[in-house]
Amino acid sequence: MTQPSSQAPWRKDAETFFKALDGYDQVNGLYTKAVLKVSFCELYAYANNQQHEATPALKKALSSDLRTRRDLNLLLRKHAIAFMERAAAASSGDIEKREGDGFNLTLKPSKANPDQIYLIIEAFEREEIPTLLFIESDEVGVLRLKIDDYYDGEAQILLSSQDDVVKALRNHASEVILR
């Protein structure tokens, strides 16, 4: 039988380490912060149902909880129509066009109003009809845009130039998934 004193050195270190982490959590208020919980049903509906409106809890979780974003990303990639990766790190300036998996996304300024941007989604050699566009960005989390009026391989969506979707699409570090 080993003596308690022979286990004391590593136990003392573990106890000291635990107390330090516990103190850190208390000082930073981590015990009082609620863990963001979103049901799988809601996450699934958000990923697949164009008519589903996200609850405030889901919106907050997607902007600040990496686990929720990872789970959504897995759902989206499993049944994605098209995936457009981040642009090359050497890209400078804003991106106005993205291409991938048989689709083009183009941001085109409106001639009538400079504060408006057309998002043009075009398919080439693809028959699938996307109904949702997801953009994942480290800055804003996950954004979702409904695609209505997709006809004959093309959709045009009018957006404000200040819209988070436009900013995220222009960001070279964003990823885009069409569903």
Image (cartoon, rainbow, N blue to C red):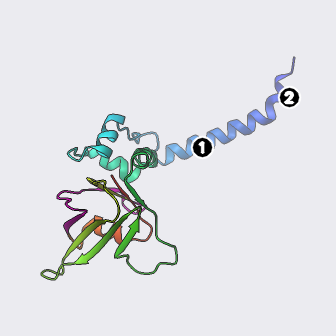
What range is drawn magenta here? Answer: 136-158
Residue receiving disc 1: 21
From the viewer's perspective, tell me whether residue 16 is left or right of residue 155: right
User: Could you tell me residue 131's position as x and y percent?
Assistant: 26, 53
Residue at point 85% right, 22% down?
A: 3
Residue at point 42% right, 48% down?
A: 65
Mark 2 or mark 1, earlier in chain: 2
Residue receiving disc 2: 6
Amino acid found under the numbered disc labelled 2: Ser
User: Could you tell me residue 89's position as x and y percent?
Assistant: 52, 73
Residue at point 50% right, 47% down?
A: 27
Position of 52 relative to 64 (above/below):
above
User: Could you tell me residue 119's position as x and y percent?
Assistant: 25, 69
* Quarter of the image that includes the N terminus: top right
The Cα atoms of the two marked residues, 2 and 1, are separated by 25 Å
Label 2 SS: helix
Q: Quadrant of residue 40?
A: top left
Q: Nearer the viewer, residue 114 or 25?
A: 114
Q: Is residue 84 magenta?
A: no
Q: Which mark is residue 145?
A: none
Position of 155 relative to 13 (above/below):
below
